[in-house]
Image (tube, grey):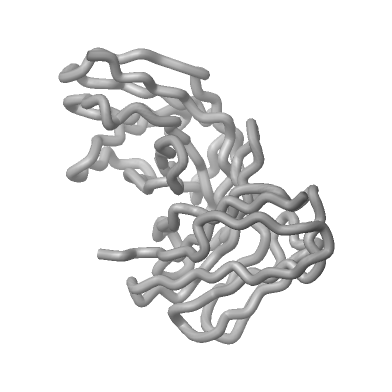
């Protein structure tokens, strides 16, 4: 799996958009980008994933650069309940293992 | 929706005791997984089951056994617990191979004294 790089932490104001960056400069053509989050004492929660096109669902938007070397997860209106560790993961299609790195600790402040 | 359910949520064992962690999913997923998470570390895959009737080792299988009881249930057994197995254990499931995401339970917090 390609390695990902995320900032260790970031703050966000409640009600504002949170933009979480992720670098994956060695990503291969058949690797998807996944985002998960882990709220304290809970299991990882799937947010969104994509290959090369931008994706949006009810939780977030995923913007992948044209060269696929980086991506941004956007939480459009952050709430206090979005405070969590966010993980950016790249995974080869048909690979069973998800490799969780250190992630970004996001703190949403009132 | 229940999703992935793990039991028990908490357990304390003595060294050498045995225990089975249970996991069940109601999403009709083919694949199921067991991970462990230690403080300051990411999740590490212990075992997985690509489909009913099959199991395979992950990154850290030593000291564990698994059983895919049926399509819904995947259990993890510690035959002789050791303090190094103190961890939070997460079960996950996914639809099939390919790019489908894994969905996780809320974990079993296991302490071995």
Does residue B52 appear to the left or right of A1 in the view shown?
left
Q: What residue sits 50% from the left and 47% below the top?
A: A31
Q: Quadrant of residue B75?
A: bottom right
Total labels: the figure holds 0
In the depicted structure, whether residue B39 falls above or below residue B32: above
The C terminus of chain A, quarter of image: top left
Up-down: is B41 above or below A105?
below
A2 vs B50, nearest the viewer = B50
Q: Is residue A67 visible?
A: no
Residue A104 in view, yes or no: yes
Q: Position of residue B22 (x, y in %)?
A: 54, 70
Between A24 and B109, the residue placed more toward the observer is B109
Q: Quadrant of the N terminus of chain A?
A: top right
Q: What is the x, y in percent for residue B51?
A: 52, 79
Q: Residue at x 44, y 27 (%)?
A: A70
Q: Above or below — where is A43 with respect to A38?
A: below
**x then y, percent, for residue B46:** 67, 59
Q: Is residue A8 left or right of residue A53?
A: right
Tell me: residue B12, above or below residue A15: below
- Provide residue B27's location: percent of width, then percent of height: 33, 71
Pick whichever, A62 or B27, lies toward us. Answer: B27
Q: Residue at x 66, y 48 (%)?
A: B87
Q: Quadrant of residue B16?
A: bottom right
Residue at x 58% of width, y 34% of height: A101
């Amino acid at each position: 799996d390609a390695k990902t790089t995320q900032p260790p932490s970031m703050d966000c104001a409640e009600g504002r958009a949170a933009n979480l960056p992720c670098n994956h400069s060695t990503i291969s053509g058949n690797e998807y980008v996944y985002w998960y989050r882990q709220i304290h004492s809970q299991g990882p929660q799937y947010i969104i994933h994509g290959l090369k096109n931008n994706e949006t669902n009810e939780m977030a938007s995923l913007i992948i650069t044209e060269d696929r070397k980086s991506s941004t997860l956007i939480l459009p209106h952050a709430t206090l309940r979005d405070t969590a560790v966010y993980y950016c993961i790249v995974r080869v299609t048909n690979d069973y293992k998800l490799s969780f790195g250190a992630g970004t600790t996001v703190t949403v402040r009132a | 929706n229940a999703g992935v359910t793990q039991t028990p949520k908490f357990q304390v064992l003595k060294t050498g005791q045995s225990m089975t962690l249970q996991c069940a999913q109601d999403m009709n997923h083919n694949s199921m997984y067991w991970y462990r998470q230690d403080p300051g570390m990411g999740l590490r895959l212990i075992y997985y089951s690509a489909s009913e009737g099959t199991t395979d080792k992950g990154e850290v299988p030593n000291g564990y056994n698994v059983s895919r009881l049926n399509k819904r249930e995947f259990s993890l057994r510690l035959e002789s617990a050791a303090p190094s197995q103190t961890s939070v254990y997460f079960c996950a499931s996914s639809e099939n191979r390919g790019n489908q995401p894994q969905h996780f339970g809320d974990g079993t917090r296991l302490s071995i004294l």
